[in-house]
Image (cartoon, rainbow, N blue to C red):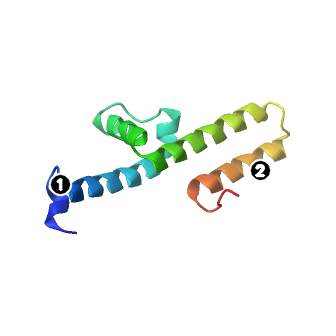
């Protein structure tokens, strides 16, 4: 990485910062989606990042939709089906299974 990546305002700095924010958002995606991040500058930066970064926004929306769907069907589904859905959701979120 070049020195430019550490000089605020340069293209390299913005690119490095965005990559770091993407990585941080991926680590905290469940907390972000569930609104469980502690209030502060970091939470605001991650929330702004989701608005500005289409891939991160799409991932958050997918996880949000998946969680909402599990809640909707949990009232009617038998326990085995519900556990299979939860396991699928965990695998999708941790990247061990790809959506088809």
Q: Residue at x 34, y 34 (%)?
A: 44
Q: Residue 67 has which mark?
A: none
Residue 96 horizontal side relative to residue 37, left or right: right
Q: Residue at x 31, y 32 (%)?
A: 40
Q: At 70% from the left edge and 52% from the top edge, which residue is drawn?
A: 87
Which element type, helix, strand or loop, lies under badge 2?
helix
Quadrant of residue 23 within the rendered picture: bottom left
The image quadrant where one finds the C terminus is bottom right
Label 2 packing within 10 angstroms: few (<14), some (14-19), many (20+): few
Q: What element carries label 1?
A: loop
**Residue 90 position within the rendered picture, expressed as x and y whole percent measured from the top left:** 63, 52
What residue would you read off at disc 2? 84
Instruction: Give coordinates of residue 18: x percent, y percent.
Output: 32, 52
Q: In this view, does 3 lie to the left or right of 20?
A: left
| Rendered location of residue 17, percent (x, y) | 28, 53
Query: Which disc is residue 10 wearing?
Result: 1
Report how many numbered discs are placed on residues in the image: 2
Dividing the picture into quadrants, the one containing residue 20 is bottom left
- Name the side, left or right, on which 60 lies relative to 44: right
Camera-nearest label, 1 or 2 = 1
Residue most extreme to the front: 11
Decide: is 87 above or below 76: below
Residues at discs 1 and 2 in contact (Cβ within 8 Å): no
Q: How far apart are marks 1 and 2 (CA)?
A: 47 Å
Quarter of the picture containing the N terminus is: bottom left
- Label 1, residues with CA under 10 Å away: few <14, some 14-19, many ≥20: few
Quarter of the figure with residue 47? top left
Give me the residue at 53% from left, 45% from top: 58
The x, y position of residue 85, in whole percent, is: 74, 47
Query: Which is nearer the N-term, disc 1 or disc 2?
Result: 1
């Amino acid at each position: 990485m070049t020195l430019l990546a550490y000089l605020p305002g340069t293209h390299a700095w913005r690119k490095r910062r965005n990559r770091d924010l993407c990585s941080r958002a991926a680590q905290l995606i469940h907390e972000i989606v569930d609104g469980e991040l502690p209030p502060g500058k970091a939470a605001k930066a991650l929330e702004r990042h989701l608005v500005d970064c289409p891939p991160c926004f799409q991932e958050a929306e997918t996880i949000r939709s998946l969680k909402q769907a599990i809640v909707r069907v949990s009232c009617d589904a038998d326990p085995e089906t519900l556990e299979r859905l939860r396991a699928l959701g965990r695998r999708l979120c941790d990247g061990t299974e790809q959506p088809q």
